[in-house]
Each structure stands twice: as C-alpha cells, then as structure tokens.
Image: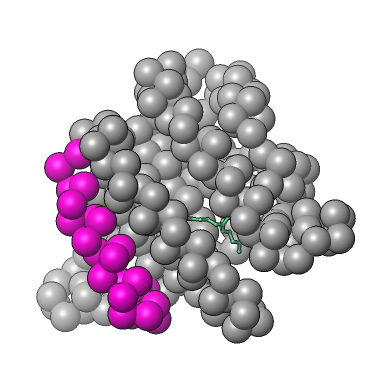
C-alpha cells in the first residue's frame, strides 16, 4: 500500500468543451476552470494533513498554447495575473511556496516580474509548494537542461539531469491526473513522470472537484507501485 501522496500533477483539460456544451464563450470556460482550481486549492491544507500532499504541479499553459487565438491567450494571461494577485494578497494566511516552471521569457515583462516576485517572496514558506507550469514544455525543459550540462562539459548521470531540470527542487509526481478523458501527457513532465500513476477521469476540468480528487487518491491506494522491481 502506498502511504503518502507527496506530489501530484494536474493537467487541467476540457475548459473549451465545457464552454461549448453550455453555449458560452471560451473565456467563460477558462474562468470556470480557474474557479475550479481555486476551490480545490482551498482544500490543500487539509489534503496535506490527510494524505501528506506537499507538492502540486499545475499545467496551466503549454508551449503549444501560444498558438491559440491571440484573444484567448490574452485572456489566459490576464487570468494568471489575477490568480497571482489573489495569491499575493493572501500571503499572510497562506504559507505556501510558489514556483513557476516554464519559459517565462515569452510572457509580457510585467507578468514575468510578478511571477518572479511571488517566487522570491514565498521562497521560505513551509506549508507545501504549488508549481505553476506556465509556457511549459517538457522537451523544451530537457533541451535547456542538456545545453546547460554541455556547457559544464562533463559526463552526466540521471541524478545530474534531475538536478538541472526546472523542477530540480520538486519531487517526481506520485500521481498525474488529466481530466476530460484525454489519455496523453502532452509534453507535461516527461522525465519526472516515469514512475507516476496515471488517472484520466472523463470529467471536464471546470467540473472537477476535491471529491473527484480524493476518489482518485482512494484508487491510488489500491494500486501497487513496483517501480520496475
Ligand atoms: C485546457 O482546456 C486548459 C487551459 C489551456 C488553460 C487552463 C488554465 C486555467 C484553468 C486557469 C488557471 C489559472 C491559474 C492562476 C494557474 P482546453 O482549453 O484545452 O479545453 P479543450 O480541451 O476542451 O479544448
């Protein structure tokens, strides 16, 4: 039996389908997804106590997402900013460390600054880590890391690779969940997920609740993780 669930990855998928089903705008779908995330985030302190959950990796924007309609991209960037502002305003109550993994250079400068400031401000917080994967691509992360290792000019081990990845201070996820019935990783944590347990609920992300998450945790406990042994 697996005792703690230390680290999870969430691929929040299905916002646009949720919107289409309701005949509302794509933006309304993303807003509903944002609210679903906030509702789950409120439960993190309890999830930490009950399951040992300390790291939540949230795939919010992939390198591929830059190719979407510019209006949709702008709306998403505004949502990220709103989320970061709300988090910043609550730092008196929330003792969580915020990490951003991804190629931030593609974001507008003011948003880059905000994200880096939030990372800096929360660096010593101790009640868990939320890592937002923003402009994230697993292959981009590997290429960037390999280039940094080449510049050091030595032969590398698996451990060396883990240490230079953007996620170097985040343990590999025990569980990766992708909502909306899609069974793909889509460039999310390819190196880190080799021993993760995968769950693909049919629920569209805006409808995903903490009860759904805990249902997955219950199923996880019934799986035997052998890590190749
Ligand atoms: C995937 O659904 C969702 C996204 C690309 C964006 C997710 C972002 C949020 C929920 C906002 C999060 C906010 C913060 C602060 C991190 P999709 O648009 O691909 O939907 P589809 O699969 O139905 O087309």
Residue sitting at the far front: 89
Is 94 above or below relative to 114? Answer: above
Residue 116: in sight, yes or no? yes
Residue 229 versus residue 51 in the image, above or below: below
**Could you say where residue 96 lies in the image, as x and y percent from the top left?**
29, 39
**What residue do we see at 26% from left, 79% from top?**
147
Residue 5 shown left or right of residue 211 in the figure: left
Residue 33 placement (x, y as % from top left): 62, 51
Where in the image, quadrant-wise, is ligand 1 located?
Answer: bottom right
Q: Residue at x 14, y 77 (%)?
A: 153
Q: How many callouts does the rendering have?
A: 0
Q: Quadrant of residue 141?
A: bottom left
The residue that appears at 56% across and 20% down in the rendered structure is 221
Q: Is residue 120 magenta?
A: yes
* Relative side of 149 to 141, left or right: left
Q: Which residues are magenta?
A: 103-125
- Tell me if residue 142 can be seen: no
- The relative height of residue 60 versus residue 154 in the rendered view (above or below) is above
Q: Position of residue 191 (x, y in %)?
A: 43, 57
Counting from the top left corner in percent of width and height, residue 126 is at 21, 34
Q: Main secondary structure of the magenta part?
A: helix
Task: Indicate yes or no whether the magenta region holds residue 104.
Answer: yes
Tell me how the rendering is colored: one colour
- Nearest the viewer among 135 and 149 is 135
- Residue in view at x 16 percent, y 80 percent: 151
């Amino acid at each position: 039996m697996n005792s703690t669930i230390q680290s999870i990855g969430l691929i929040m998928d299905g916002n646009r389908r949720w919107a289409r089903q309701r005949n509302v705008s794509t933006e309304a779908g993303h807003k509903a997804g944002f609210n679903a995330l906030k509702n789950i985030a409120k439960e993190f302190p309890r999830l930490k106590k009950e399951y040992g959950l300390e790291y939540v990796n949230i795939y919010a924007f992939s390198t591929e997402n830059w190719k979407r309609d510019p209006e949709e991209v702008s709306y998403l960037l505004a949502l990220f900013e709103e989320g970061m502002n709300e988090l910043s305003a609550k730092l008196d109550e929330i003792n969580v460390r915020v990490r951003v993994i991804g190629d931030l250079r593609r974001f507008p400068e003011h948003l880059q600054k905000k994200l880096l400031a939030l990372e800096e401000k929360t660096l010593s917080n101790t009640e868990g880590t939320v890592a937002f994967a923003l402009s994230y691509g697993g292959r981009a992360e590997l290429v960037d890391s390999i280039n940094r290792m080449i510049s050091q000019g030595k032969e590398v081990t698996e451990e060396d690779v883990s240490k230079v990845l953007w996620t170097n201070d985040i343990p590999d996820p025990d569980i990766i969940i992708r909502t909306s019935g899609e069974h793909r990783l889509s460039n999310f944590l390819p190196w880190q997920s080799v021993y993760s347990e995968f769950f693909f609920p049919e629920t569209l992300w805006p409808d995903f609740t903490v009860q759904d998450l805990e249902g997955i945790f219950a199923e996880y406990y019934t799986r035997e993780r052998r890590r190749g042994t």
